[in-house]
Amino acid sequence: DTEVTQTPKHLVMGMTNKKSLKCEQHMGHRAMYWYKQKAKKPPELMFVYSYEKLSINESVPSRFSPECPNSSLLNLHLHALQPEDSALYLCASSQTQTGLGETQYFGPGTRLLVL
Amino acid sequence: GNSVTQMEGPVTLSEEAFLTINCTYTATGYPSLFWYVQYPGEGLQLLLKATKADDKGSNKGFEATYRKETTSFHLEKGSVQVSDSAVYFCALSTNAGKSTFGDGTTLTVKP
């Protein structure tokens, strides 16, 4: 099984809502990532978890709050978002964070619209 | 810092044409190099990779060779199909575990 799943597929939320994005993998990977991708742009790294601990936070605003409850799950909690946060949010995983040539496996993404 | 520069798109080709998408990079140390493909409405999929100089990555008829002397990792395919229409991203990663992506090149193949 080389699949990363993400739910929901689409999400519409108001600026005062609280919502969560979920990501799951069962490949035994110990590194998990959140990326933000705007239309016609490359993915931008937001967070990296390594062995369930936050390893990298790319200066992401606090209205985005990541959580890694166990080695298979990764959540992204959203609160008080702005319209400019509308984007495709991609989750990825890899065997480890720092291995040479580590391949990242991406999920299909959650398309978020903030009204 | 690290950076990846891809040839600007979009690229439009007829079926069975030869494809080249140029990619050059700047990095400290010895990065690994990747090509990812993104089909409409989907996440990124690894197409091929190379981890050291002169390595050739290949998959589904696509090839790219890690050229340290020219800091390049150009993607080639001898005969493209309509189903190859997608966005292609060149990327590098270092042992810090952070990936740097190029801006992406949109390929459209017409029958």
Image (cartoon, coloured by chain):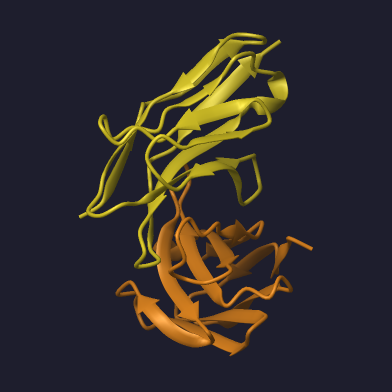
Chain colours: A orange, B yellow
Q: Is residue B73 above or below residue A105?
A: above
- Rendered location of residue B5, percent (x, y): 31, 36
| Residue placed furthest toward the bottom | A69
Residue A63 seen: no
- Rendered location of residue B32, percent (x, y): 41, 50
Q: Which quadrant would the N terminus of chain A be assigned to in this image? A: bottom right
- Rendered location of residue B92, percent (x, y): 39, 49
Q: Is residue B86 above or below residue A32?
A: above
Front residue of this view, candidates B99 and A84: B99
On the picture, is B80 further left or further right than A56? right
Determine the residue positioned at 70% across, 20% down.
B82
Determine the residue positioned at 64% across, 13% down.
B79
Q: Is residue A79 above or below residue B97?
A: below
Determine the residue positioned at 70% across, 62% down.
A9
Front residue of this view, candidates A44 and A87: A44
On the picture, is A110 further left or further right than B96? right
On the picture, is B22 further left or further right than B20? left
Q: Is residue B51 above or below residue B19?
A: below
